[in-house]
Image (cartoon, grey):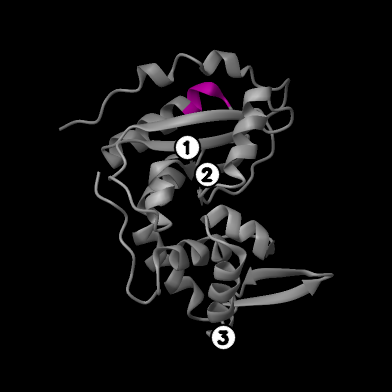
Amino acid sequence: MRAPTTFSMFRSAHSAALAWEILTASTPQTITELAAKVGVDRTTASRACDELEVDGLVSSTRLGRARLVRGRPDTPAVRPLVELLEATMEVPAIISSAFTDVRGITEMRVFGSWAARVSGIPGPPPHDIDLLVRVANAAPREIDAAVRTATQRLGTPVSPTLVDAHEPSEGGRALLQALSSKPSVRVVHAPQDALAGPPADLSSLDDFIARIPPPRD
C-alpha cells in the first residue's frame, strides 16, 4: 500500500492531520489533546492552530489555562477543504463509508503505521490498517461485513481492535492509554444510539478477524 499523500498547501503532514482532526470534530478540543492525537509536541500543534485560525478555518477560546480549538463550518472554504483532506485521508474515508450503517459504535480511529505515516513519522508503507472500534451494542455480523467491505475496497487488510465503550477490559484500557500518546486518525462516524438489549458479547468477535479474506491481486 502506498504511503499517504500530503497536499502542498500544508507545511507538513502533521498540519494536514491536525486540520482533519479539528474540522471533522463536533466538539472543541484542547491543544494538548490535538498534539497527542497527531503525535507532535504542544508547541508545534499550537503553531499549526495559529495558522488555521489566521486563515479563518478554526476559532479558539480559553477555559482557564487551556486553549480550546474548533472548526468554523460557517467559513465557505471549510467544506471544500475537508473534501480535499478526504483525498489525503483515503483510508478513514473508505472505512467511514463501509461502516455507515453499523449502529452501536461510539468511536473509530486508525492507529499504528498508517497513522504514523500520515502524521509525518518516517517508515515503510503500511501493510495493514489498525482500527480501533469502540462499541456499545454493535451487531457482530454488521462489524464483520463492514470490515470485509473496507478490506476489499482498500486492497489492504483492515485489522480491527474492539473495545467496550462503557466498560473496557484491562487490555482495552491499556490500548486506550497507549493511543493517548501516539498518532491516530479519526474515522468520521456519528455516534449512534445503542441497540436495545444487553451489551454486545465481544468474545463472539474473536474469530471473525481471522476469516477476513486477503485482498485480491
User: From the image, which quarter does the N terminus lie in?
Assistant: top left
Instruction: Name, please, the residue furthest toward the right.
Output: 64
User: From the image, which quarter does the C terminus lie in?
Assistant: top left
- Residue 44: in sight, yes or no? yes
Residue type at mark 1 is Leu
Residue at x 65%, y 69% (from the top left corner): 70
Q: CA distance from mark 3 to mark 1?
A: 33 Å
Residue at x 30%, y 41% (from the top left corner): 154
Contact flag, marks 2 and 1 (Cβ < 8 Å): yes
Residue type at mark 2 is Arg
- Please say whether residue 141 is one of the residues in the magenta stretch: yes
Q: Is residue 131 above or below residue 7?
A: above
Residue at x 55%, y 13% (from the top left corner): 204
Q: Which residue is mark 2?
A: 109
Q: CA distance from mark 2 to mark 1?
A: 6 Å
Q: Which mark is residue 54?
A: 3
Segment tinted magenta in the rendering: 139-143
Q: Is residue 141 above or below residue 156?
A: above
Left or right of residue 71, residue 86 in this image: left
Q: Which mark is residue 131?
A: 1
Left or right of residue 212, residue 112 in this image: right
Q: CA distance from mark 2 to mark 3?
A: 28 Å
Left or right of residue 96, residue 179 in this image: right
The tag earlier along the polypeptide, 3 or 1, is 3
- Please say whether residue 29 is one of the residues in the magenta stretch: no
Quarter of image, res 21: bottom right
